[in-house]
Image: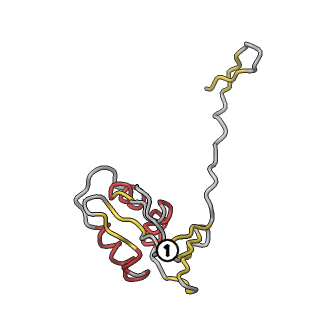
């Protein structure tokens, strides 16, 4: 049950659930010379379409959403991609980062020791503090 105000000082009760609020998510994400299409589930790099597994796609999407030069913490990536909440000793993230590095180029993903990973900032641009 929710309470609605009519702006007249009276309250009205409703037994209907509130209407869902939808967040608009951009279809394309760009970074490190790549274009990720969320709806088409494709990634283009230097004019060619990459073959990524569903997990690799979700991981790259999470990194690209953070942006170039912005660190994505291990806990964040484990939660977003694998739904693992809290500290984890699993190395599944490291394995899939390695797979992505092979497919998109190792220079595009940087390790932030003890913290997580980030997309590299293209040469000539300045990294902001994250």
Residue 68 position (above or below residue 8): below
Q: Is residue 17 left or right of residue 50?
A: right
Residue 80 position (above or below residue 38): above
Q: Nearer the viewer, residue 75 or 70?
A: 70
SS under mark 1: loop
Figure colour scheme: secondary structure
The residue that disc 1 covers is 32
The percent position of residue 120, horizontal first and vertical second, equals 42, 71
The percent position of residue 47, horizontal first and vertical second, equals 58, 86
| Residue found 32% across the figure and 66% down from its top | 93
Could you tell me which quadrant the C terminus lies in? bottom left
Residue reaching furthest to the left = 89
The percent position of residue 52, horizontal first and vertical second, equals 46, 78
Q: Nearer the viewer, residue 57 or 15?
A: 57
Could you tell me which quadrant the N terminus lies in? top right
Residue reaching furthest to the right = 8
| Residue found 31% across the figure and 64% down from its top | 112
Residue reaching furthest to the bottom = 48
Residue 57 position (above or below residue 51): above
For label 1, count other residues whose C-alpha is less than 10 Å away and answer few (under 14), some (14-19) or many (20+): some
Residue 73's image quarter?
bottom left
Residue 77's image quarter?
bottom left
The percent position of residue 57, horizontal first and vertical second, equals 47, 71
Residue 59's image quarter?
bottom left
| Residue found 25% across the figure and 62% down from its top | 90
Q: Nearer the viewer, residue 19 or 92?
A: 92
Q: Is residue 97 left or right of residue 44?
A: left
């Amino acid at each position: 049950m929710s309470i609605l105000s009519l702006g007249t000082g009276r309250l009205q009760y409703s037994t209907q659930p509130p209407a869902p609020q939808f967040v608009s998510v951009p279809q394309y994400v760009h970074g490190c010379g790549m274009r990720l299409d969320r709806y088409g589930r494709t990634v283009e790099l230097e004019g060619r379409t990459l073959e990524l597994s569903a997990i690799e796609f979700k991981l790259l999407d999470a990194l690209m959403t953070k942006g170039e030069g912005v660190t994505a913490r291990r806990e964040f990536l484990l939660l977003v991609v694998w739904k693992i909440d809290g500290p984890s000793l699993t190395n599944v993230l490291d394995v899939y980062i390695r797979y992505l590095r092979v497919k998109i180029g190792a220079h595009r993903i940087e390790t932030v020791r003890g913290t997580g990973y980030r997309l590299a900032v293209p040469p000539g641009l300045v990294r902001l503090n994250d």
